[in-house]
Amino acid sequence: MIVQVIATAVGGVGTFRSAQLEVLLSRISPNTLFAESALALLSPSTRTLDVVMFTQLEGALMGSPLPFGQSLLLIWPQLSAMTALLVLLFTASYVVFQRQEMQTHKRAGL
């Protein structure tokens, strides 16, 4: 909902730019990243995860499934983003834990 409001405010109503911006902003959410990854892996007929124009569909073989390797290439950015978020959140929680541990040792006089 918030993503749609921001995309409409920046890109205008019903424009290709606002649709691209909405997809880009929604990919901040891990839920969207996972949903797109699952869609591409479980539905091999998925060709793209971005906004598609009719001119991009010319010459595409609709209905023919992608091989597994091509599906992995399609979701590579989503997998990278989820891995980066995992490492970032783990690192942040580890730093917070270490600081709390140091404060506990200072209070105990160790």
Image (cartoon, grey):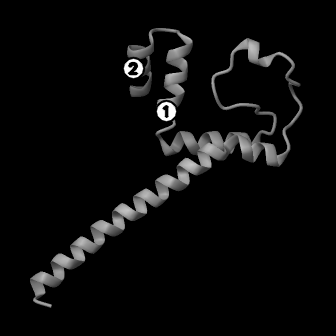
Local crowd size for mark 2, using a 10 Å CA cut-off: few (<14), some (14–19), many (≥20): some
On the rendered structure, is 77 left or right of 31? Answer: right
- Quarter of the picture containing the N terminus is top left
Residue lying at 69% horizontally and 40% vertically, measured from the top left: 39
Residue lying at 51% horizontally and 30% vertically, measured from the top left: 24
Q: Is residue 97 above or below residue 47?
A: below
Percent position (x, y) of residue 69? 81, 48
Q: Which residue is mark 2?
A: 5
Percent position (x, y) of residue 56? 75, 18
Residue lying at 85% horizontally and 44% vertically, measured from the top left: 67
Q: Which residue is mark 1?
A: 26
Percent position (x, y) of residue 52? 68, 20
Local crowd size for mark 1, using a 10 Å CA cut-off: few (<14), some (14–19), many (≥20): some
> Who comes first in sequence, dot 2 or dot 1?
2
Q: Is residue 41 visible?
A: no
Q: Quadrant of residue 43?
A: top right
